[in-house]
């Protein structure tokens, strides 16, 4: 598919659908790598940290480092675990570019807009169900959440991609980041004279406390709150730019990998530099956080593109491709039923305690439960993939 980047809307652009073999496996693999951690790899690392705690200085330091990276920064800062959610939103942006032109070709511009709206609503609805739906009181419904934010970002990024040219899209991206920075940097929380980025002392948290209905994730604030959704849309747009670059045929495949990695390094550096004034904080999705997380996303996409799409590496990547092809379904099933609770039916209870005693290593049974649960998820993903069963929302 060749996407002509001219100053006109996508509705006026000639779109050529790619052949089936031209699908970018790296995007599926990266999406699968992303969800892999949520499906149980994170819990396995937490258990491994506990297992290595008293195994000598070297092993203990390894476990401590892994455990540190697989926990969110308390507020300011950036760790690997802070990277998982923005990476998924970034990949959503890449997928918009790969999917919407074909949708326009098949259903027309109006049909594409309706499909985008429907998909966004379905994602938002799945998010409501994921967090309990209306099983409790109205006040206990979580209206903001991971899937809800993905749906909102997908909706607005798709509309921007469908209706604006590249220059206008870049202008929107800059406006979102700079506008959010200005709001957070120059408008203090009502009743306070000075601006702060501290918890419960900033404008984003204040808006969530007084204007976001339902249950807030952190009681007085929500990491997927109202105002912080604006820069999250910018994260999705960064993925759109990456997707457009991947589909640009003026560059050779290996050049694309190198440019993505180089652009990612520059973006990470720019994010940390901005972070000197506007700290890198995932919980309020600061503009500097967008750049840091987006930069690492660009680097990882470039590496995956080189390994999988250019060099054709499949050994060790197929499991990620299986998961990535049904990421939303697996995430939703894990949230509703959980793969670890299923695994505990086989290696839980007294058997888990026996394994800990036999190995003389606490948390070994818990580690095996997470690994087994992750194995169940991979096998289910493989089953769906081979039978071409995909969740289409």
Image: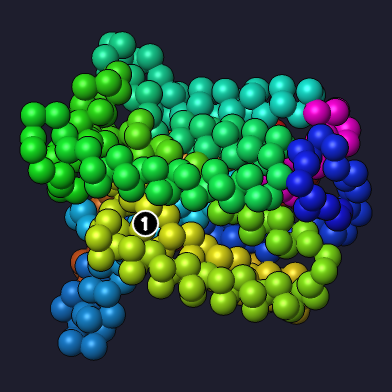
**Can residue 171 be seen?**
yes
Of 328 and 82, which appears nearest the observer?
Answer: 82
Q: Position of residue 247 (x, y in %)?
A: 77, 59
Q: Point out the image quarter for the N terminus.
A: bottom right
In percent of the image, x 64 and y 28: which residue is there?
119
Magenta span: chief secondary structure: helix
Q: Is 76 inside the magenta-drawn segment?
A: no
Q: Position of residue 10 (x, y in %)?
A: 78, 39
Q: Which residues are the magenta region?
A: 95-109
**Can residue 339 be seen?**
no
Horizontal relation, residue 322 to residue 23: left or right: left
The residue that mark 1 highlights is 289
Q: Position of residue 31 (x, y in %)?
A: 58, 55
Q: Residues within 10 Å of mark 1 (few under 14, many from 20)?
A: many
Q: Where is 284 relative to 143, above or below? A: below
Horizontal relation, residue 173 to residue 167: left or right: left
**Number of numbered discs on residues:** 1
């Amino acid at each position: 598919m060749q996407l002509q980047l001219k100053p006109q809307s996508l509705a006026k652009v000639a779109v050529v659908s790619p052949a089936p073999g031209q699908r970018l496996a790296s995007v599926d693999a990266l999406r699968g790598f992303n969800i892999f951690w949520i499906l149980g790899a994170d819990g396995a690392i937490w258990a491994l940290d506990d297992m290595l705690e008293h195994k000598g200085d070297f092993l203990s330091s390894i476990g401590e480092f892994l455990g540190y990276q697989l926990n969110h920064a308390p507020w300011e800062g950036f760790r690997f675990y802070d990277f998982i959610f923005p990476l998924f939103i970034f990949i959503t942006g890449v997928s918009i570019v790969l999917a919407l032109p074909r949708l326009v070709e098949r259903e027309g511009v109006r049909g594409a807009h309706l499909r985008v709206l429907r998909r966004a609503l379905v994602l938002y609805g799945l998010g409501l169900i994921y967090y309990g739906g209306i099983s409790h009181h109205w006040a206990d419904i979580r209206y903001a959440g991971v899937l809800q934010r993905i749906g909102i970002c997908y909706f607005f990024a798709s509309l921007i991609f469908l209706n604006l040219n590249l220059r206008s899209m870049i202008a929107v991206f800059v406006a979102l980041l700079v506008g959010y920075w200005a709001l957070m940097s120059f408008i203090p929380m009502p009743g306070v004279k000075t601006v702060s980025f501290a918890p419960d002392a900033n404008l984003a948290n204040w808006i969530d406390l007084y204007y976001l209905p339902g249950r807030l994730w952190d009681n007085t604030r929500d990491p997927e709150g109202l105002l912080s959704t604006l820069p999250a849309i910018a994260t999705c747009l960064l993925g759109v730019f990456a997707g457009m670059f991947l589909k640009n045929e003026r560059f050779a495949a290996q050049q694309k990998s190198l440019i993505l990695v180089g652009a990612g390094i520059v973006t990470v550096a720019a994010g940390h530099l901005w972070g000197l004034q506007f700290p890198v904080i995932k919980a309020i999705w600061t503009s500097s956080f967008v750049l840091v997380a987006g930069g690492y996303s660009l680097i990882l996409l470039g590496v995956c593109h080189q390994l999988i799409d250019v060099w054709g590496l499949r050994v060790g990547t197929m499991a990620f491709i299986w998961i990535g092809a049904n990421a939303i379904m697996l995430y939703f099933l894990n949230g509703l039923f959980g793969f670890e609770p299923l695994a505990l039916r086989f290696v839980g209870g007294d058997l888990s305690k026996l394994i800990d005693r036999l190995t003389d290593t606490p948390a070994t049974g818990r580690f095996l439960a997470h690994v087994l649960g992750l194995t169940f998820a991979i096998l289910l993903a493989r089953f769906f993939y081979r039978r071409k069963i995909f969740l289409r929302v």
